[in-house]
Image (cartoon, rainbow, N blue to C red):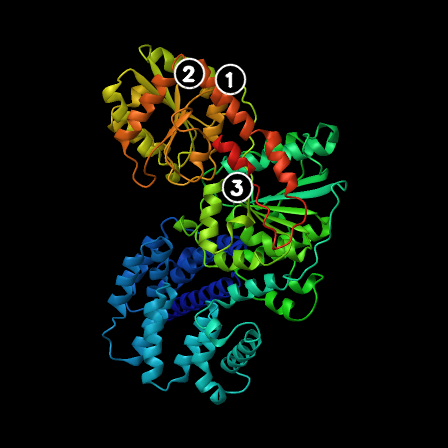
Amino acid sequence: MNPPLITERADAKSDLQWVQAQLEEIVAASGRVQVAQENLARAKVLARDHMEDSKVRFLLLRLKESAGLNEGMAEQWATLLHECPDDLQIVRYCATRLVKERHVEEALSLVDRHLPASAESPDRLFARAKLLSDIRAHDQSDALFRQLITQYTDRNMRVEFAKRLRKRGLLADAFEAIAPVAKHLTPGSKAAELADGLASDYAFYQRFETEEGLAGKDIRIVSMKHAILHFRDRQVPENSPDKPVSVALVTGSLGPGGAERQLTRLAGELTRLAEFPEQRPPDVLMKTKKVEVLVKQHTEPPGSTKKQDLDFFLPVLVKAQIPVTEINRLPAISVSHQALPEGSLSRLLEQLPPPVHYGVTRLAPVLRADSFDVVSLWQDGTCLFGALAALLAGAPTIHLVFRGLPPNIRKDRFREEYPELYQALAKVPGVVFVSNSRKAAEAYSEWLGIPIMRFHILYNGVPDLATDASAADQEKWKAFQESTTDATETIGGVFRLEPDKRPQLWIKLAALYLKDRPQARFVIVGDGRMRENIEALAEELCVTNRLLLVGLSNHVGYWYSQMDASVLLSRYEGLPNVLIEAQLLGVPVISTPAGGAGECFVENQTGHLLTDVDHPDLHEACEKVASMVDQVRNNEQLRAHSRNRAQKLFSLDAMLTKFLALCMPVSENDESMDLQPMRLMQA
């Protein structure tokens, strides 16, 4: 009986090797997320009977990583590492998974444990340098690589360092690392090809920047900068006011934000003007012939487990029959297949930051095909992917529309590309800098070193709000009234339950306010990721019985009409629509001095501005809320003043007039910033 058992074992071993080989082929062919997702089911079937084998599990986990799976991955890698503690490949995937889940310190500790800095072996230190690079600990990795190539003559170390630097876009540094050994590399080898490519690219970019200007710089950002500057001498055709213009309004999503709401309103007004030109405001000379909205994404991403409301305003645009294009669904057309002049520009376009490349390959072709007169790019992220695309498409007028404080202040939104992007665009004819508040314009001007007179102020246009309600809203309010029959005042807020709006601080304000005025009640209209946190905090602070969380509502005017005051405690804002909307219904407002909040109302007449935006004093806030409630109560004159001022400064006609004035081509030296809205604001 022994021989058959030996044969059986041999067959099992052969089967395992075959499965391993099949999985290796599948992993190698699954470089793209969608392909990996499609291959995962087949791989699981292959691996099913061999899950005790560490290599099979390793390959399966790698495929899951490629497929973008996240749930439980850190634990699965940790389990495999526990079984194979000396496998540096598994250490690498464990560490990179920890970084993906933002456990950076744990990843560094893992590296130190398996490849300590005290190791004497150059091979171990070389492995440590590579692993530090893999987890994006670049400062430590670069220092160790430089130490190793100084101490040892191993060409592989220089080649590996150069390869990694080049991947990060650090062309000059990569060239410097490989140059000393370039002549000694085997002709035709990948290392020699790398060295030749670096030398060629370095020589090319020295036509645009000095050695000092290239050192330590991401060459993709340098490429973006000089691709934009290629258009600095472009000729912008003059446009007669009698000639109707076509307008593309471009944004990131159609979610329930202030910028998205404003863009949707503007699209509707421009479309109405195109259909009924006789309805133009008196000061408007320009006509529109076509309006389209192009949005990066309005459908949920594949595999999304939580609705993000990326299409919140889509029904409004569809109802108004405004064409909407989702850029993510457009085909990516490579630069080599686009009608572009050969030469330096084409070569620059080969190396761009990923968001800029995205716009050049997806957005530029559709803008070129439709030949828009005006491409209006809303918010920093859209400016990043859309500006060069609009230039390549030949758009005469390009708006860079800023909707809040700049990303050097809002650190979570900062990207290295932004300063170079905007400073280069400031030198291109036809590019118009637009902000929805003076405060934001001043902040961008100071940050970028661009004269304040280059910025135009386009205040939000807010229509008069209807106060009707849905049956669901009426039921919510009626139930809340019945549970708070003793209430003498209603304090409200309309904002997303997101960190920047600081809803937790709002709940703390409510709790403090109730100590002095226990018959107050509170209403928040809006929803977001922090809803559960807010509910828990309200319960902890014993304000649940005095608080109504309405959620999203399409009848905001109805909720304003129930309020005695509206409070906004944001950390960051552009020009808050909610402060304008409240005043349109005669509701006084109290706000932190975030962005252009102070431009929305008259201090101590239609609202109060708190002293500090970073650390608002809740005692001060309570006093100002109480003061405003008492001041406006039964004072119809103040309410009327609030409504009239909001209608004058922030009407749809005022917004439309200013926007169309900005649709005339302007030169880079234009300093015609319209300060008239500022004078009106101060009146």
Q: Is residue 640 above or below residue 670?
A: above
**Precedes in sequence: disc 3 or disc 2:** 3
- Quadrant hosting residue 60: bottom left
Contact flag, marks 3 and 2 (Cβ < 8 Å): no
User: Mark 2: which secondary structure?
Assistant: helix
| 408 on left or right of 541 | right
Residue 229 locus on image (x, y percent):
60, 63
| 527 on left or right of 680 | left
> Label 3, on which residue?
300
Q: Choose between 21 and 236: the one closer to the eye.
A: 236
> Label 1, on which residue?
469
Q: Is residue 556 visible?
A: no
Contact flag, marks 1 and 2 (Cβ < 8 Å): yes
Q: Choose between 337 and 347: the one closer to the eye.
A: 347
Given this view, does label 3 or label 2 mark the residue nearer the observer?
A: 2
The amino acid on which the numbered mark 2 sits, given as a three-letter code, is Trp
- Measured Cα–Cα span from mark 3 to mark 2: 32 Å
- Quadrant hosting residue 162: bottom left
- Which residue shows up at 51% across the image and 26% down it? 646
- Which residue shows up at 46% across the image and 20% down it? 586
User: Mark 3: which secondary structure?
Assistant: loop
Q: Choose between 447 and 673: the one closer to the eye.
A: 673
> Label 2, on which residue?
477
Residue 209 locus on image (x, y percent):
53, 72
Q: Choose between 127 and 441: the one closer to the eye.
A: 441
The amino acid on which the numbered mark 1 sits, given as a three-letter code, is Ala
- Which residue shows up at 50% across the image and 65% down it? 28
Q: Is residue 683 visible?
A: yes
**Precedes in sequence: disc 1 or disc 2:** 1
The amino acid on which the numbered mark 3 sits, given as a three-letter code, is Glu
